[in-house]
């Protein structure tokens, strides 16, 4: 299914990396080698306590930084598939340390491309973010640049059996730094700081993210930005689901933050294909790529004027649905929500 015997996961000690590794270990015995590539030795040590290479003999923990192209080249030796999840992500930190984000998110992506071209890699799937669509902050701008690099790399693969694509989704519910653990902690004080009562977001969990990457590996032609079809939710409804008795303190939108998530812009609509469970944004520079893609993939063009935003979605989660989701997926100290 994965067309591979060896997988490298950059940023492999993060929330997605752990979930993806767990799925592979439980469901993909044909994968002979799983390489977790990251720069934090403590996180690797902690992950190795959870997924021990003594128990799982196909696991490798490989220290390195995507900024270091020589180390990346060494990491991809003998690798069939690269899942590129390494990134700096905190919006305020990006505004204060812009070039640090450029070095990791932009130059790091180019290093992955160069190493994959030279190392015999067959598939590259890079994880992106909704903030790369019409970016309003530097983090989003670096991820848009990264996406463009990954997509454009398909133009220089030559005769190599190599395809590179992107998967784009928003904040993962319950992951580190997301609003759910923030609200769970804040409710202990009886006050939930809310940026804007009209704010909406898409909902996706880690398992959905893992499933999407696996789907992309099976179906990618190279050069797509895949976007999942997701339900939306209102931040005020999430606050009610987690802490119905808490006071809501409106603090205003933070610098670089959008009121609504946007994953497909109006300008990307003409190059977007509906694949059923997912959308695929094709390169606008492809020249007739939509028509060619429709001949290969089972899909259809979207309607004129199409865009994909969390506030205009046709599916919204109710308070009860959100409460069930938080109970199922968020890690809490007491296990009780609301």
Image: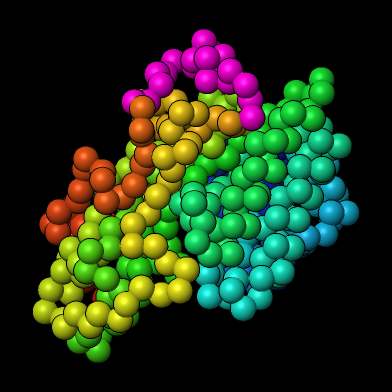
Q: Which residues are magenta?
A: 285-303
Please identify the quarter of the rendering in which residue 139 is found. Answer: bottom right
Magenta run includes residue 288:
yes
Q: Residue furthest top?
A: 295
Write the residue at 20% across / 87% down. 190
Q: Residue at x 43, y 33 (%)?
A: 269
Q: Position of residue 312 (x, y in %)?
A: 26, 45
In the displayed structure image, the side of residue 280 where residue 314 appears, left or right: left
From what the image shows, is residue 325 above or below residue 337? above
Judged left or right of residue 65, residue 146 is left
Residue at position x 81%, y 36% from top? 117
**Residue 251 percent across, percent down from the top left:** 30, 81
Q: Compared to 130, does 119 lie above or below?
A: above
The C terminus is located in which quarter? Answer: bottom left
* In this view, 160 is above or below 151: above
Q: Quadrant of residue 318?
A: bottom left
């Amino acid at each position: 299914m994965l067309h591979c015997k060896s997988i490298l996961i950059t940023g492999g000690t993060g929330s997605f990396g752990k979930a993806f590794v767990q799925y592979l270990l439980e469901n993909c015995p044909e994968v002979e080698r799983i390489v977790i590539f990251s720069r934090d030795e403590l996180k690797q040590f902690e992950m190795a306590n959870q997924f021990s290479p003594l128990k799982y003999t196909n696991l490798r923990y490989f220290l390195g930084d995507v900024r270091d192209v020589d180390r990346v080249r060494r990491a991809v030796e003998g690798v069939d598939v690269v899942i590129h999840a390494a990134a700096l992500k905190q919006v305020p930190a990006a505004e204060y340390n812009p070039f640090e984000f450029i070095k990791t998110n932009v130059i790091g992506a180019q290093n992955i491309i160069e190493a994959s071209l030279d190392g015999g890699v067959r598939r590259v799937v890079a994880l992106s973010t909704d903030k790369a669509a019409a970016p309003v902050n530097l983090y989003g701008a670096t991820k848009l640049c990264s996406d463009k690099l990954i997509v454009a790399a398909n133009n220089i693969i030559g005769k190599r059996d190599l395809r590179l694509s992107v998967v784009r989704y928003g904040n993962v519910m319950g992951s580190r730094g997301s609003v759910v653990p923030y609200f769970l902690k804040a409710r202990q004080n009886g006050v939930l700081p809310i940026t804007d009562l009209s704010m909406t977001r898409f909902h996706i969990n880690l398992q959905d993210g893992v499933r999407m990457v696996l789907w992309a590996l099976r179906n990618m032609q190279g050069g797509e930005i895949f976007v999942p079809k997701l339900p939306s939710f209102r931040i005020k409804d999430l606050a009610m689901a987690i802490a119905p008795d808490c006071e809501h303190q409106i603090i205003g939108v933070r610098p670089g933050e959008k009121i609504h998530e946007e994953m497909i812009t109006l300008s990307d609509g003409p190059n977007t294909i509906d694949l059923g469970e997912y959308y695929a944004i094709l390169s606008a520079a492809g020249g007739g790529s939509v028509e060619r893609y429709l001949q290969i993939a089972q899909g259809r063009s979207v309607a004129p004027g199409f865009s994909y935003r969390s506030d205009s979605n046709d599916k919204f989660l109710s308070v009860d649905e959100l409460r069930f989701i938080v109970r199922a997926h968020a890690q809490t100290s007491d296990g009780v929500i609301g």
